[in-house]
Image (tube, rainbow, N blue to C red):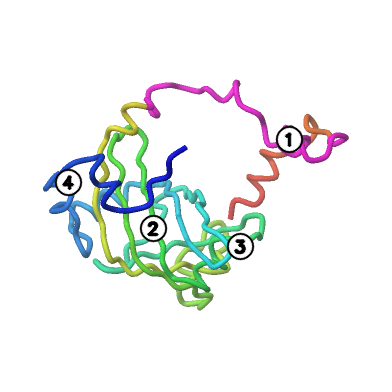
Amino acid sequence: MNKIDSIAELESLYGEVSPRSLTKVRSQLSPAYERWINASRFLVLTTVGSGATDASPRGDAGAVVRVRDENTLLLPDWRGNNRLDSLRNIVEDGRVSLMFMVPGSTNVVRVNGSAVVTADDEVTKQFAQQGKHPRTVIVLTIAEVYFQCAKALMRSRLWQAGDESEQVPSAGDFLKEVQAEFDAEAYDSSYEEYAKDRMW
């Protein structure tokens, strides 16, 4: 395998940049971007630290983030497995990216910027649901926001393909690969209820 080890060599394979792919980038939210982000219940959060990178799915019953102003987004950190991979990275290196999706839309909206983690009550209590609130909130300062070309979602037919989950391993199957005697079936039968209980 030949490794590409220079930007010039890489760029020579692709040709000129489409002008619109550059002019579409904004440094803060516009009304259209705010409306799109407010419609998104799901995003992927990417972070980087000295030990590793991380990509983490985040979802909510309503808007997955709160728009504080045209430069700032608030992302609650709801209960999970307490690995804290994303949060550790943000504390160490504030560079983050968000990728927002809306079911049925072939567009994806991307936000790049810097973030901090806060546990301030005045911030976390803004997100109270069912008597609970997140332990922390990620506060993201926007550096770039732009929409992504629709080709990837169109090519994959992500929203049109229907339920294809029968062909993939379950959570219990993944755990059984690590520990052969693990009861994957019993785990899977209780997994959904466990996840619901820890949703907030």
Q: CB atoms at circles 2 and 4 under 8 Å apart? A: no
Disc 3 secondary structure class: loop
Q: Position of residue 14 (x, y in %)?
A: 23, 40
- Amino acid type, callout 4: Val
View extreme (right): residue: 181
Q: CB atoms at circles 4 and 3 under 8 Å apart? A: no
Magenta extent: 156-182
Q: CA distance from mark 1 to mark 4?
A: 45 Å
Q: Earlier in the sequence, mark 1 or mark 4?
A: 4
Disc 2 secondary structure class: strand
- Amino acid type, callout 1: Gly
Q: Quadrant of the C terminus?
A: bottom right
Residue at screen point 38% across, 46% down: 4
Q: CB atoms at circles 3 and 2 under 8 Å apart? A: no
Q: Which residue is mark 2?
A: 97
The picture quadrant where one finds residue 162 is top left
Q: Which residue is mark 1?
A: 172
**Residue 171 counted in the magenta span:** yes
Q: Which residue is mark 4?
A: 17
